[in-house]
Structures are given as structure tokens and as C-alpha cells.
Image (cartoon, helix red, strand yellow):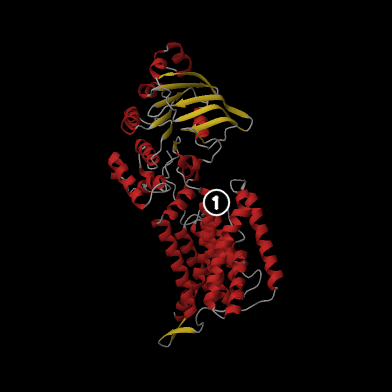
Amino acid sequence: MASQAAALAVEHVEAGYGGVIALQDVSITARPGTITAVLGANGAGKTTLLATISGLVRARKGRVALDGTDLTRRPPEEIVRAGVAHVPEGQAVITELTVEENLRVGGLWRHGQAGRAAALADAYRRFPVLAAAKNRSAATLSGGERQILVIARALMASPKVLLLDEPSLGLAPRIVAQVMNLIQRLRDESGLTVVLVEQNARSALAIADTGVVLNVGRVVAAEDAAVLAADEALRQHYLGF
Amino acid sequence: MNEFLQFTLGGVSFGMVYAAIALSLVLIWRGTRILNYAQGAMAVLTTYIALTVINHTGSYWAGFVAALAAGLVLGALIERTVIRPVENRPPLNAVVVTIGLLVLIEGVVGIIYGGQYRSFPAAFSVTGLHAGSVPLGISRNDVFVAAAVLVVALALAAMFRFTSAGLRLRAAAFNAYAARLLGVRVGRVLTLGWALAGLIGALAGLLVSPDTFLYPSSMDSIFVLGFTAAVIGGLDSPVGAIVGGLILGVALNYVAGYLGSNLVLIFGLIALVAVLMIRPSGLFSVSHGRQV
């Protein structure tokens, strides 16, 4: 196989909060058009990893790069402009705005007036449930609808890489399946590169190409998703299924 | 009955000035969760600038425009230089900084312009209007005061609702965390919020100074009443700021008319304490929707 450029490369990153080190010497690569599942127990550093990629947390050591361009220590609003969209866990819906206004915020910086309208129309075509609710306050949406809204909003900026933090959290199993299905479609139909942080390892590995397991801030395994899912010892030790 | 009508209409004019101050406080509060104690002092400075321009050019409107522009620049400048370092710090830091600014600005104004009371021109005639032979208790200028604040408030509402800058301002105010992750340059947006607040404060200074005279601390009591109006409205709500200003203006004008004008500030403070005791979130505070 020819050497394939990594869309997103995290190299030897160290990060933390105050005196606490949350990530130590973490390296992952997300190849273009693939889903990389980042797994591990609570406190393993999964959320910190995404926050370090998107600039919410400063990397103390190491480097984050998108298609070879260094993003390390740039502020979040510039990293999203470079093509990395971060959908954080919970609280990301701006509940005081309508559904449509939430979507528009996602595309504000990128397009001209016509481009914004096209992106909005595209989002409604892709997510009819949002079109039906567009003039409602985002506070009235259900948990599943909110998850779709924050993903659709991140897509308004046409990112190259989508970082998703626990998209299944608090959702009913049927809705989890729908969200996972949506993530899979984004990869297959749009060629999007996805980094998916999940507690729900079984669902995540079912759609992922690659899996990375974190434990107490370190990478303990990075394999094909199918290999990870078949590794009984690893599953029982770190993934709990 | 005539008296009552006069006091009511006169109160609307005062109330709109309080509303303007309240609106400027709300703009800053929503974006940065900082209460700008220097808002009145900033308005004093911009009104002195207006007076200087009026004296040099002979044109009231040149001074008017100069004051608004100065307010815009002053608001942005203050946010960038002294407020930025205390954003996202414990609230007391910002309290100390804005009170420090209040003292500093009033001191500098005193040094430059002196402490004496100066009269400030009104935009239009201040002779009372009549409906037939019935005096209305307001002048052409009072109508202008109310209309000017209303126009600015409506323009602001339209900007919030229909423009990209307005959407950025709202997104950053409601959820700065999500807004940054969506590429909103929150720092610039906050600067814009302070600039707009500076402009509206400058407008209030221009409108009230013909009534109060102009001196370094001439906006202090107006600031307290504007703050009271903002608290009545809930500090978070621009509509609440306007309504709060109107309620307070009319109520205090009844106090002035029926009980005596030296009681106005005392009743304003009583109103402030009463609202804080009975309904500290204000009458119009924004609900935050479902959290889960």
C-alpha cells in the first residue's frame, strides 16, 4: 500500500489541567474517509484528547496536524476554520436560539450569503427532522434531535475532520443506532474523516475502521476495529463488554 | 387628571433615558457577565466631547455624531485594554476595574474641563407642548428623546435578529463555548458588544444633559437609575431594559410631581432594593429552556 496521508495526526501529545496530567505521549492518526473510535473508561482522557485537538485545552508537548498543517496551540475558533469541527458532549445546543439559528451559526464564518443559504438547504435536505423544526426554539428538541442538530451544525462548515464526543450519551438504544448509522453515512457518502469518542464501545467498533483504546491518559491499543472487537482480553479489561 | 397626564408623558421621556443606560448595561452583561459601573462616566466624557465639538463648529448635530462615535470607540478601547484581562476571572476583579474606571474617567474629565456646571444644549425646543389649551407636560425635545432611544433600540433589535453580526453576538452571549467551537471569534464579538454599549451610553448622556447640566459626576444618579431599570428588566433582557426604564421613569415622575423632586433618587434606590429583595432575577429574565 502506498503511504497514505493521515488527515489528522496527533503526535506524542501531553496535556492536562493544572497539576493533573490527563494525556501522556498520545499519538493517533485518522486516515482520510475513515472512522477512528477512541475508547476507554471514564477518566481515560478521551474528552481531553478531543479538546486538545480542537484547541480548548493547550497541548504541553507534542503536535496536532491536519493534512500536514500544524494546528497545535491555535485557538478553537481558528482550528475549526482550518477544517476540524468538534461536537462536544452535552450543552452544545444553544438553547436560546432557534434550530435554524443554531445551524446558521455553524456556517457563519465560511460562506458568502449564497453559500450559506445553500449549506442550510443542504442540511435540511439531509436532515428533514430539522427542517420540520427549524423555527422552533432549540430548547424544545428531544435528546436525539439535539444530537442530530449539533452534528448538522458542525457540517455547515464543511469540515474535513469531525470530532464527536459521546454522541450516544443519554439516548435510547433505537436512537443510538440512528446516530451511529448517520455517522457511517457521513463517512461513506461524503468521505468525512471522523474521530468518535464513545463509552459505548460495542456500537462504536461496529461502524469504526480503526479503534484506539486509552487508559489513564495513555494509548494501550491501536488496531483495526474488527481486531479490537475480537480481542477478548482487551475487551474485558478496558472496554467492559 | 391633566396633572396625571403631564406626569405620565414627562416620565416617558425620563424613562427612555434610563432605558438607554439599562440597554447598554444589558449588552455588556449578556456578553461578559460584567456590570459596567463606568457606563455613566463614559457617557460624561463623550458628552463633554460633544460640547467641545458644538462650541467649535456651532452645530449641535456635529457634536451629537461625534459623541456617538466617541462612545463606540471608547467602549471598544476599554474592553480591549482593561476588561479583557478580567474576563472569565472572579466577578470582583471586574467590579474593581470598572469602579476604578469610573473614578479615573471622572477625575480626568475634571482635570480637562473643570468641575463647574455647564449647560448643554437640547436638540429641539424645550417649551411645553399643548393639545389645544391643555399643557402636555412635555416639549418637542422630550419627544425627540423618547424617539431617539426607541429608534436605537429598534435598530439594535433588528441587528440582533436579522444580521450575521447580531447572530454572532447572541451565540457568543448565550453559549460562548459552543460559539467558539463553531468558529465565532468571541473576543471580537465582545469588543463589538462593548462598542455598541458605549454608543448607547453616549446617546443617554446627550439626551439627559440638557436637564441635568454637565459636570464630571453628572451621570452618577442617572447611572443608578439606569441600573435600577436594568435590574427591573432582569439584566439579561433588552426588552426588559426598555420596559424597566419606562416603568421607573413614569413612577419616579409621579414621585417628583406629587411628592417633590428631591425624593426621586431615594425612591429609585428603594425600587432597586425592593426588586432585588422580591424578584432578584427581574421581571423579564430570559428562561433557559430545558437543560437535558
Q: Is residue B164 above or below residue B70?
A: above
Q: Is residue B125 visible?
A: yes
Q: Position of residue B88 (x, y in %)?
A: 58, 46
**What is the total number of numbered labels drawn onto the structure image?**
1
Q: Position of residue A169 (x, y in %)?
A: 41, 30
Q: Position of residue A123 (x, y in %)?
A: 32, 42
At x 46%, y 40%, the residue is: A82
At x 44%, y 15%, the residue is: A235
Quarter of the image holding residue B272?
Answer: bottom right
Callout 1: few (<14), some (14-19), or many (20+) C-alpha neighbours within 10 Å?
many
Q: Is residue B247 above or below residue B180?
A: below
Q: Is residue A128 left or right of residue B244?
A: left
Q: Is residue A150 left or right of residue B118?
A: left
What residue is disc 1 on? B32
Nearest to the observer: residue A10 or residue B193: A10
* Chain letter behind tag 1: B
Q: Which quadrant of the figure contains the N terminus of chain B?
A: bottom left
Q: Position of residue B206 (x, y in %)?
A: 55, 72
Q: Is residue B229 visible?
A: no
Q: Is residue B167 left or right of residue B266?
A: left
At x 54%, y 49%, the residue is: B187
Secondary-structure class at tag 1: helix
Q: Which quadrant of the figure contains the C terminus of chain B?
A: top left
Residue type at the position of mark 1:
Thr
Nearest to the observer: residue A5 or residue A58: A5
At x 65%, y 68%, the residue is: B217
- Give the farthest residue toward the right: B111
